[in-house]
Image: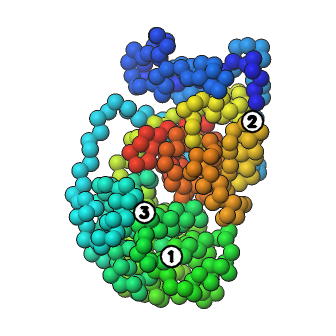
Amino acid sequence: MHQSNQKAPVYKQASTSKSAYHSGGKLSYSQGRKPYHSAPHQDRSGSPYHVRPAGGGGYQAARPTNSGGYRGGRRGGQGGGRGGAHKQFMDISKFVNKAVITEEVPHFKPEHSFLDFKIEEKIKANILKKGYSDPTPIQDRAIPHVLAGQDVVGIANTGTGKTAAFLIPLIDKVLKNHKEKILIMVPTRELATQIDDELRDFALMLSIFSVCCVGGAPIVRQMNNLRRVNNFVIGTPGRLKDLVERKALNLAEFKTVVLDEADRMLDMGFIHDMRFMIAKMPAVRQTLFFSATMSRDVEVLIKDFLREPVSISVKTGDTVKSISQDVVRVGSRNKLDVLDDLLKQNEFSRVLIFGRTKHGVERLKDELVKRGFKSESIHGNKNQPKRQKALDLFKNNHLQVLVATDVAARGIDVSDISHVINYDLPSTYEDYIHRIGRTGRAGKKGKALTFIE
C-alpha cells in the first residue's frame, strides 16, 4: 500500500473547452463536453481526487508535488508477458467517447410483448419470474423468425439480450417435440456456462435437459452425461470436436444449431472445427447465427452455413451509447501505481481489467492482492472449476476486481460492472468492442478506460 503521507495524484481530462475551473467544489466547463467527473472524488484515505482538464486528450497521470512522489518508469506496471512484437490496436480516437448523461434517449417500443409470442405458457411464466417485461430490440425482431423455423443472422451490440433471443424460441421448439436436439457452439467456456445457466432459468420445471461440454473440465464426465437424454448440447468447438471423434456425440441427430459470437470463434482459429461439425449435421436444419460484429470472413461463413437467412441488425454503432470511454495517459509514472490510484476511488466498485497475456494477468492479480484489493483472475491456464469460482465471486460482489484475458472474458455477463479497464491495449478494434461491452449492459451506464503509455 502507499504511504499515508502521499497525496493522491492529479488526473487530467481532455475537453473541447478552452477553460475550466473549480467552483464550489465542482468542475465547471465554459463549453464543450460534460466532464467525466462532476466533482472531486475521494480515495479510501479521504483525500480529494480532483480531475482537471488538459489539452492533450484523456486522463494524464501527474506526479504528486510532495517530495514523497511516486517512482518508477513507464514500464513499471505488471502488464508483462513474454517479450517480442505484439499486435496492438492503436487508434486513440476510438477509445474516447462520452456518454451524454442528460440526453433524452427515445424509449424503444417493441412490436411484441413476451405474452404476445406464440410460445408455451410455462415459458412465459418463467420469463416473468426472471423479471423480464418487454423484449429488447434483438429479441423483439428475432424471436418470431426463430419460432417460424427460419435461419436467422442477428447482429446486435454486446449486452442487448442475444442469448434470450434464441433460447426462448428454441425451448418452445423442444416443448413441441421432446425428441428435438439443439447444438449451441460458443467461443469460450464462460459463455457456454452462462448460456447453460440462462437455459435452466427459462426451462425451469419443463423437463428439458442440457449438457455443457467445454475444455478444462473432465471429458469422461461429459461423455457420461451425453449418454443421457439431452435436448441441448452447449460447448466450445475444440471440446465438441473431441467428443464427436470419440463417438460420444452424434451430430446427425441435431437439426438445429446456434453459432453464438461466431466472429470470435473465427478470431480464435476455430473455423476448421466449425466446418467439421456443420458437415456432420443434417443438410436440412435450422441455423441461427448471432454476433456483435460483421466482417468479410463472417459473411463467408453465413453464405456457407445458412440457407436464405433473415438478417436482423439492431446495432446503434460499434459501441453502445451508455458507455463513457476515455484514455488514461500514464506518461512517466509507474503503470501499476496509476491503476492503484484509480481503484481507490469509491466509484470503482466492480472493475473488470483486461490484460494481454495469461502470465501478465496472473501477475497483475497477485500485485493487486498485495496492495489490498480483493481480486481474482481468469485465463486459459486455469481449469474450469477455478475460473467458474472466480467468476462466481465477482458476480456475487465478493471481489472488487476481476483481471482477465480477452478469451476468458468473452462470456462474462455480470450486472453492474462499474468500469472496464484496458490495462493492456487490445489486438483489434473488435476485441475492444467486446471488452468494453461488459459494462453499460441492459441500458445501464458504464465507463471504459484505456491505458496509454
Q: Which quadrant of the figure has residue 218?
A: bottom right
Residue bearing mark 3: 163
Q: Could you say whether the residue bearing mark 2 is in a helix, strand or loop?
A: loop
Label 3 Cα crowd, 10 Å radius (few <14 / some 14-19 / many 20+) = some
Residue labelled with disc 2: 371
Q: Is residue 157 left or right of residue 142?
A: right
Q: Secondary structure at mark 1?
A: strand
Residue 432 to residue 370: above or below: below
Between marks 2 and 3, how big is the CA–CA gap?
37 Å
Disc with the residue nearer the chain's start (1 vs 3): 3
- Residue 201: image quadrant is bottom left
Quickly name the residue at label 1.
Answer: 210
Amino acid found under the numbered disc labelled 1: Ser
Q: Residue at x 38, y 45 (%)?
A: 443
Q: Nearer the viewer, mark 1 or mark 3?
A: 1
Q: Residue at x 44, y 48 (%)?
A: 441
Task: Specify which label sits upstream in the sequence, 2 or 1.
Answer: 1
Which quarter of the image is occupied by the N terminus?
Answer: top right
- Residue at x-position 57% and y-position 37%: 349
Question: Quick check: can you spot residue 377?
Answer: yes
Given the image, on which type of amino acid does mark 2 rest?
Answer: Arg
* Rendering coords of residue 398 (x, y %): 62, 46
